[in-house]
Image: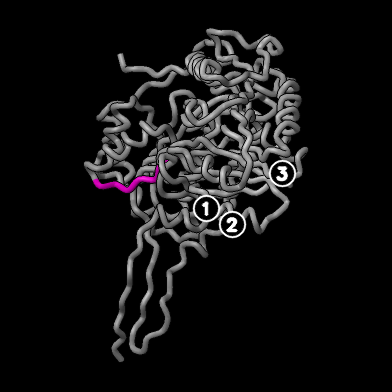
Amino acid sequence: MPAMQQTISPVDGRVYVEHTLHDAAGISRALDRAHAAQRDWAHRPLAERTALLGRAIDAFVAKADEIAPEISWQMGRPVRHAPGEVRGFEERARHMLSIAAAALAPVEPGQKPGFVRQVKRVPLGVVAVVAPWNYPYLTAVNAVWPALIAGNVVILKHSHQTPLCADRFAEALASAGLPAGVFQVLCLSHADTSRLMADPRVANVCFTGSVSGGRAVVAATAHGFATAGLELGGKDPAYVRADADLPHAIDSLTDGAFFNAGQSCCGIKRIYVEAPAYQAFVDGVVELTHRYQLGSPLDPETTLGPVVRPSAAAALRAQVHDAVGRGARQLIDERRFPASRPGTAYLAPQVLVDVDHAMPVMREESFGPVVGIMQVTSDEEAVRLMNDSAFGLTAAIYSRDAELAEALGDRLETGTVFLNRCDYLDPALAWAGVKNSGRGCTLSRVGFEQLTRPKSHHFRIKT
């Protein structure tokens, strides 16, 4: 019997879908098909590739009503929010199509008599995309569409939690007429995922996941010298200055902490508030948090669904318990959220105060609806604490002084600095992390540089 992977739904704990795992022979066959397809795909005109991929976007969006509830069943996102992932997929995919001609155009270094010189951007070859469950389409599209646009072929290995998302990509691309072998889906164990990444036929790996997973990617790709782009999560901070629009900051940061049950790499996990605004900010966050409706993600009234699995909820409870044992205070009474029950994936949101950086809850990743809030007395203290982290994906500043915010942002060790917003990805900007949040970038015209290599043409013209 072939080995199977099971997706256990956080909604009710049942097996939602099963897929057969591919083995080493299956990996090798997929790589052979990919290599056979890549040269033809790369040699097709860019306009032909983008037209086909545009049709695939249309086909995908046409199935939005079917796709959205699948997200809820697989990873617990409330049905009222799940359609946003389809809209985000479309925004990012269409943006990368719109900038492709300019981003992939040859670089002309200037005229030199008797010579023609240019640097072309050529595809790498086979790109392996390893995608996570928390934003199953938004994370995958960041790599899949730009890689295909640039002339690469793609093998997608999606999370065991969200395998239907990979199937939906395959369905849309096939319906648009993508040639066989240009995009393939593999269901793999951890060991066989490493086998895929280590294969010398793979030119690039795009990975989104944990820090330990990122280390496994680096170890695997060392065998074949594939390049790798890594997005490894964060412990993203926000700083609320005394001059901030406080109602806006409260609304934005509460949503940034608890949207998607806090399961976002760039979600807000720690907030620093300047002393004059501190108490009003905390009171506002608590009041807004009390309005969340925790329950089945299939209920349209639910605004906070379960985390991905009971073990994740248990780990978050332990992190909160540890913080309280070290002197933190919980401001949210779990009894206000009757659906929150130990042993299940349903977990009440939690706001912690009297926290400090000796507590793991302020330093280690909290992939769930938990946020710590600290009072600070100056910009200097805020910057020091925001940088006091092993992660560096995004950081947010709330202030009416844009000039000062830019100066503070320049001192922050992070891939993205926000002003008066958070937990958002603009496809026109490079999405990148520093420190344990990863390396490389996706999206924007810079993202195409990660999925191509420079090839110089140096022609001496004889007349």
Q: Quadrant of residue 377?
A: top right
Are the two marked residues, 3 and 1, in contact with CB atoms closer than 8 angstroms?
no
Q: Quadrant of residue 271?
A: top right
Q: Is residue 73 visible?
A: no
Total numbered circles = 3
- Mark 1 neighbour density, 10 Å: few (under 14) some (14–19) many (20 or more): few
As displayed, is residue 65 above or below residue 241?
above
Q: Is residue 367 left or right of residue 38?
A: right
Nearer to us of marks 3 and 1 is 3
What main secondary structure does the magenta stretch of the protein show?
strand
Q: In whole angstroms, how far apart are the C-alphas of marks 3 and 1?
A: 19 Å
Checking the image for residue 411, the label placed there is 1
Checking the image for residue 207, the label placed there is none
Q: Position of residue 19 (x, y in %)?
A: 42, 21
Q: Position of residue 147 (x, y in %)?
A: 44, 49
Callout 3 secondary element: loop
Are the two marked residues, 2 and 1, in contact with CB atoms closer than 8 angstroms?
yes
Q: In whole angstroms, how far apart are the C-alphas of marks 2 and 1?
A: 7 Å
Residue underneath mark 2? 407
Residue underneath mark 3? 242
- Mark 3 neighbour density, 10 Å: few (under 14) some (14–19) many (20 or more): some
Q: Is residue 137 left or right of residue 297?
A: left
In primary-sequence order, the first of circles 3 and 1 is 3
Are the two marked residues, 3 and 2, in contact with CB atoms closer than 8 angstroms?
no
Question: Which amino acid type is marked by label 2?
Answer: Ala
Q: Is residue 227 magenta?
A: yes
Callout 1 secondary element: loop
Q: Which residues are magenta?
A: 225-231
Q: Quadrant of the C terminus?
A: bottom left
Question: Which amino acid type is marked by label 3?
Answer: Ala
Tell me what residue is drawn at x 48 percent, y 17 percent. 315
Q: Nearer the viewer, residue 438 or 200?
A: 438
